[in-house]
């Protein structure tokens, strides 16, 4: 089965400054001068994907010049260019040849997720939308109070809070496209609210191993430190 992926690579990388002053975020190098987006493309290729569409906007010419038509990686790469920011889901409406099932992901993700398995599970479950999730720990930098009627019941000093978050990696059925407006900014959150309201079943598959969203400098630094011991092993 042919596997198609759309990688969202149009963001300005504002949270990742100063690293993104001269480079688009997907081209920020992690190790061996290898950009994040090249790591993603190599992984998708090794997971059986044969066609990747890069949704681009900010500094798009640099991204196009680097990846070209994908021949360097023996995979087809083409582009969907936004004339204005369209959010995470809005760009999909501009891609006219999407198949019945396809993967969508952010262009700043490093993970050991098995993309092929996510694709196959989504198809087998006949799901309209599948979210890959991850449990993330966040350290609260304050003493958290539990109160009732102005009286303190308990205090947790700088607790560790666990959240199940979206990894920024999704499998979609083409049915989803009818929920997305044309040429308007439309995000993942808006789409989820529409699907919940419409009583559509959205599957969530929890991943428990390695995941980094390098949108923040602290996570980017972790990726650089992890390159030799963890990330390099993901490349084929």
Image (spheres, rainbow, N blue to C red):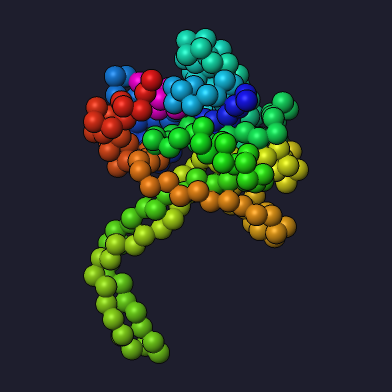
Residue shown at 73% from the left, 27% from the top: 96
Front residue of 52/16: it is: 52
The count of marks equals 0
Quadrant in the picture for the C terminus: top left
Residue shown at 31% from the left, 85% from the top: 153
Quarter of the image for residue 138 reads bottom left
Residue 37 belongs to magenta span:
yes
Residue shown at 45% from the left, 35% from the top: 114
Q: Is 81 rendered above or below residue 125?
A: above
Residue 72 appears in the rendering = yes
Quarter of the image for residue 94 reads top right
Q: Is 235 rendered above or below residue 171?
A: above
Front residue of 80/203: it is: 203
Front residue of 227/56: it is: 227
Quadrant in the picture for the N terminus: top right
Residue 86 is situated, as x and y percent measured from the top left of the image, at 62, 38
Residue 88 appears in the rendering = no
Residue 134 is situated, as x and y percent measured from the top left of the image, at 42, 49
Q: Is 231 rendered above or below residue 197?
A: above
In the rendered structure, the answer to whether residue 145 lies left or right of residue 167 reads left
Magenta segment, principal secondary structure? helix
Taking the view exactly as shown, the residue that stands out farthest to the front is: 124
Quarter of the image for residue 109 reads top left
In the rendered structure, the answer to whether residue 204 lies left or right of residue 114 reads right
Residue 30 belongs to magenta span:
no
Residue shown at 24% from the left, 31% from the top: 229
Residue 110 is situated, as x and y percent measured from the top left of the image, at 39, 34
- The residue range painted magenta reads 34-41
Taking the view exactly as shown, the residue that stands out farthest to the top is: 71
């Amino acid at each position: 089965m042919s596997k198609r992926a759309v990688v969202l690579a149009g963001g300005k990388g504002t949270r990742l400054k100063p690293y993104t002053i001269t480079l688009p975020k997907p081209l920020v190098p992690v190790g061996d001068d290898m950009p994040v987006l090249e790591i993603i493309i190599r992984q998708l290729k090794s997971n059986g994907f044969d066609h990747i569409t890069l949704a681009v906007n900010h500094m798009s010419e640099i991204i196009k010049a680097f990846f070209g038509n994908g021949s360097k990686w023996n995979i087809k790469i083409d582009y969907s260019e936004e004339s204005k920011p369209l959010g995470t889901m809005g760009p999909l409406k501009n891609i006219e040849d999407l198949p019945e099932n396809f993967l969508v992901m952010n262009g700043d993700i490093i993970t050991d997720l098995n993309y092929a398995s996510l694709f196959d599970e989504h198809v087998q479950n006949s799901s309209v939308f599948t979210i890959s999730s991850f449990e993330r720990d966040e350290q609260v930098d304050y003493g958290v109070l539990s109160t009732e009627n102005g009286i303190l019941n308990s205090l947790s000093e700088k607790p560790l809070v666990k959240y199940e978050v979206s990894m920024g990696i999704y499998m979609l059925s083409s049915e989803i496209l009818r929920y997305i407006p044309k040429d308007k900014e439309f995000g993942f959150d808006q789409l989820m609210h529409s699907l919940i309201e419409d009583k559509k079943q959205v599957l969530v598959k929890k991943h428990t191993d390695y995941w980094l969203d390098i949108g923040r400098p602290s996570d980017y630094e972790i990726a650089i430190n992890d390159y030799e011991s963890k990330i390099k092993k993901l490349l084929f």
